[in-house]
Image: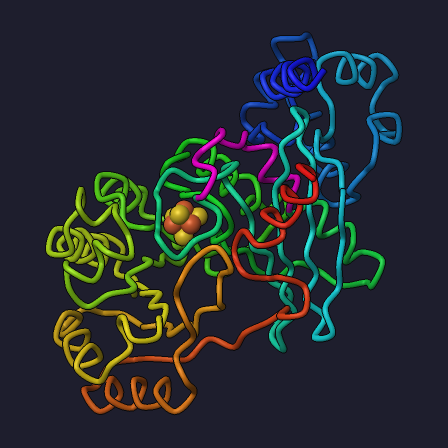
Amino acid sequence: MKQQEEQTAEKKKNKSPEKPSIYSLKLEELKKWLTANGEKSFRAEQVFDWLYVKRAASFEEMSNLSKNLRDLLQEHFVLTTLKTLIQQTSADGTMKFLFELHDGYSIETVLMRHEYGNSVCVTTQVGCRIGCTFCASTLGGLKRNLEAGEIVAQVVKVQQALDELDERVSSVVIMGIGEPFDNYDAMMSFLTIINHDKGLNIGARHITVSTSGIIPKIYKFADEKTQINFAISLHAPNNEIRSRLMPINKAYKLTDLMEAVKYYIEKTGRRISFEYGLFGGVNDGVEHAEELAELVKGVKCHINLIPVNYVPERDYVRTPKEKIFEFEKTLKKRGVNVTIRREQGHDIDAACGQLRAKERKEETR
Ligand code: SF4
């Protein structure tokens, strides 16, 4: 019986969606598809308006399209394959969403409420293969890449929740589960769609991409010359600590990473952000702050210090408050641009991967 259940679950996971999501198409791709199907290309802008401005829930609602065109779209696409399983709101307003995908996997999306606006943190993969030793998302390995439309739909779903409050998604960060540069093409399509003025119209300077440091893709991204904010998960001032925290450092060494960073800055003229998680007793000493200041000397950058949440499956502990401030002070004294990230959504498991891990446990009970 158990074996039969497992086989059914496996079959479900390998199933392709019957139809692709229309959110996967960039405006130019939709134009091409429409002309190839005997329609005028300007219809693409009308469809985009329904998808991203009016945020229609069905093709049927698209009343300025002919019945034929609505049927054609219906025949070839679905709007979204995402189903909301959980929507939680924290005391500080943070909203966390758990979505089910067409093949039964689930992903998380977080909406953070700041004084300066609403920021959505999206997921780009089911699981992750990078293996950072502090991260619950990597425990089950990589299951699959998300389609562009599955990433776009996360923002649309959050925007639909905000529509009820008459508010707007003002920024997007690609810092959820997964390594975006490991799913590069879908990530780039996603960026084009949400940035397009006929799409969700989220300005490039209000979008942030974060990578664990896949060096060849950093060069590729630099050559795209976008105005999108770029962040690197650094987490250590030297190779020894970084390799312990992030095994990817064994393949892409810190010195080579810093070379790629300099190339990015030179190509784009933009500043880079370094994410630095503070792990008690591992990388949070004054000597580490001094080494870090030396590493980024002369680099146009900003450092985000992140007091790391305790992850039940991992052994890392939080850095005490006074040590966090001392770390910050040491960097500031050396002329480094630095801030401490405010934590949000504590009461709803807002740390990367926690909600999904919890859900998996519930599922396997
Ligand atoms: S921190 Fe990010 S890159 Fe590292 S394992 Fe977790 S999801 Fe992957």
Q: Residue at x 18, y 51 (%)?
A: 260
Considering only vertical position in the picture, is 5 above or below 293? above
Query: Residue sitting at 18 percent across and 57 percent down?
Result: 266
| Point 31% across, 72% down: residue | 302
Q: Position of residue 201 (x, y in %)?
A: 60, 50
Residue 132: x percent and y percent?
Answer: 35, 51
Tell me where residue 78 sits by quadrant.
top right
Residue 43, image x and y in percent? 71, 25
Viewport quadrant of the C terminus: top right
Magenta span includes 153: yes
Looking at the rendered image, the quarter that the N terminus falls into is: top right
Q: Residue placed at 60% from the left, 62% from the top? A: 350
- Of residues 63 and 188, the one nearer the viewer is 188
Q: Nearest the camera: 136 or 145?
A: 136
The residue segment tinted magenta is 139-154
Say which quarter of the image contains residue 183: top left
Q: Is residue 335 above or below residue 213?
A: below
Locate residue 274 relative to residue 187 in the image: left or right. left
Asked whether 41 falls inside the magenta stretch, the response is no
**Is 23 positioned to the left or the right of 250 in the image?**
right
Does 131 sit left or right of 173 as displayed? left
